Amino acid sequence: MILCSILSIDFLAIKFRRMKNSIIKNTAQLLKLAHFDVLFQYKQGFYLVYAILTAVYLLLLFYLPETVRPEVAAYLILSDTSVLGMVFVGALVLLEKQQNVLQSLFITPMKLSTYIFSKAISLTLIATLVSSAIGFIPGAMLDRCLSMLASVILCSLFFTFLGLGVSSRANTLNEYFGGILLAGLVMVVPLALFFIHPVLSMIFPINAAVTLLITPATQQTLVSNIAGISVLICWNIVAYRYAMSQFNKNIIHK
Amino acid sequence: MTRDLYLIKGDLKIIGRDPMLILSFVAPFLLLIIALFLFPIVSQLSIKYFSLPLDSYFLLGSFFFFSLIPMLFGMIYGFILLDERDEGIISYLSITPLGKSGYLRTRMIIPVLASLVFGVAFLILTGFSSLLNWFEIIVITLIVATEAPLMLLFLAAFAGNKVEGIALSKSFGIVLLPVLIDYFTQGNWRWILSFSPLWWIERAIFSLQEYRWLYLAGATVFHGFIIWLLFSRFERKMQ
């Protein structure tokens, strides 16, 4: 009996150690991949283009009166920086498809989830940097910095996952843009529900993101923030599963 | 000419197959619907909630949409060009009698023609005939239609691959911004904004009528100069 329990504890310890090692290994692989993704994006001029765009946006925001800055900053963040992952990821995947990078990549021990997370994290990094500059430098969103960052990060991850799913099906850039335009429209339409039923409309990702972005700190409640973030996390899980299934279907098991 | 027609025929096939390309030919209609029907609704809402009538800005808004039409076509054809270059199709075509410049010429014809047709119709339907005569409308549309090859050549000349192309296309919005800044501000410092080809057109339409043709001449020279510059860079790049 004692021997049996010792053996089972030993077995559990080995299993736990293996799991720990595999998590460490996967995380290291993910960080390495994300690092190279960031380097590639830097080399392709993403950071330069966004540095110029941020400068233009900042000039515009400083020119505007302080009362309207939060709304304009929220608009810029939602229409450009939060969704930049969706725009860029298609070009990245299509180029890799064309250069047969994906075929080589997926016969290595690297997991599909690592690839998808690496793309999403690297693009979310630019989105967060640019959104922080737009939101914080003119002081428009300093009061709600945490909810704003949560909104931007979760929104960017969501749209990048969505873009990854669409890009796996597309063969040309125009086909991809057709797909994301449609997906984008479907995502934006529920915004109109805000005027009909503001609370119920929070179940849609765009509404949750907008609420987290534009609600001033004085009107925010812990419950509403947690609700908004939970909604976005749920949608992220859906979008991630969509990206995984589309990649499996259209690229790996093609 | 016959070989150009073959490529155009092929283009029409691509357009028929690709949903985005069909959408690009629907987009000008959508812009027109927004300009004609959504603007008045937004203005009514703005009067109701902020007591701010927006009627006086309708023409500016329509002009903004009008300049989007050739940009849209230019970008879509630019993306086709980027795809084809990444696949090495341009290299194949360059050793056929069509040649690289023939290929580029054909790629530029459809967006220019489409922008011309949609542009003239857009200006007339959105009420620009109260501000401009028919000859001015045609000249302005002709100049603005060259924005399409301008976008296409910009992508062809500067982007090494489609990823760079998408990054570059994000910066196209900067060309549109001077139009708004110029309209809402005063002073001679606004000449700094003349780096944007659209600034010249906006000045020709909205500033004093006596200077209209001067600005249009400036716009023609400026557009021609940029196209020549980009074309020669593209040729150098492809060699």
Image (tube, coloured by chain):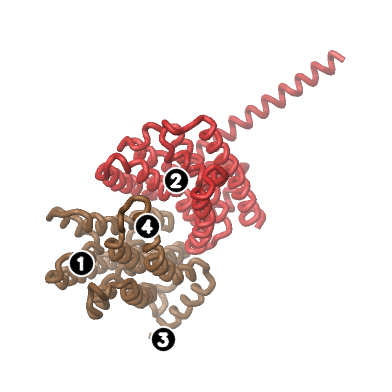
Quadrant where the C terminus of chain A sits is bottom right
Marks 3 and 1, the one that precedes in the sequence: 3
Res. A115 in view: no
Q: Position of residue A60 (x, y in %)?
A: 28, 47
Give amino acid for label 2: Ser
Q: Position of residue B43 (x, y in %)?
A: 35, 59
Mark 1 lies on residue: B222
Whether residue A58 sits left or right of residue A221 in the image: it is left
Tell me the distance, in whole angstroms, between the alpha carbons under discs 4 and 3.
33 Å
**In the image, which disc is placed on residue B169?**
4
Label 1 with label 4: CB-CB less than 8 Å: no
Label 3 with label 1: CB-CB less than 8 Å: no
Badge nearest the viewer, 4 or 3: 4
In the rendered image, residues at marks 2 and 1 fall on the same chain: no
Marks 4 and 3, the one that precedes in the sequence: 3
Disc 4 is placed on an element classified as helix
Whether residue A232 sits left or right of residue A42 in the image: it is right
- Badge 1: chain ID: B
Tell me the distance, in whole angstroms, between the alpha carbons under discs 3 and 2.
47 Å
Give amino acid for label 3: Thr
Say which chain is red.
A
- Badge 2: chain ID: A
Q: Position of residue B111 (x, y in %)?
A: 37, 73
Mark 3 lies on residue: B2
In the figure, residue B211 lies in which quadrant? Answer: bottom left
In the rendered image, residues at marks 4 and 2 fall on the same chain: no
Mark 2 lies on residue: A82
**In the image, which disc is placed on residue B172?**
none
Badge nearest the viewer, 3 or 1: 1
Give amino acid for label 1: Phe
Say which chain is brown.
B
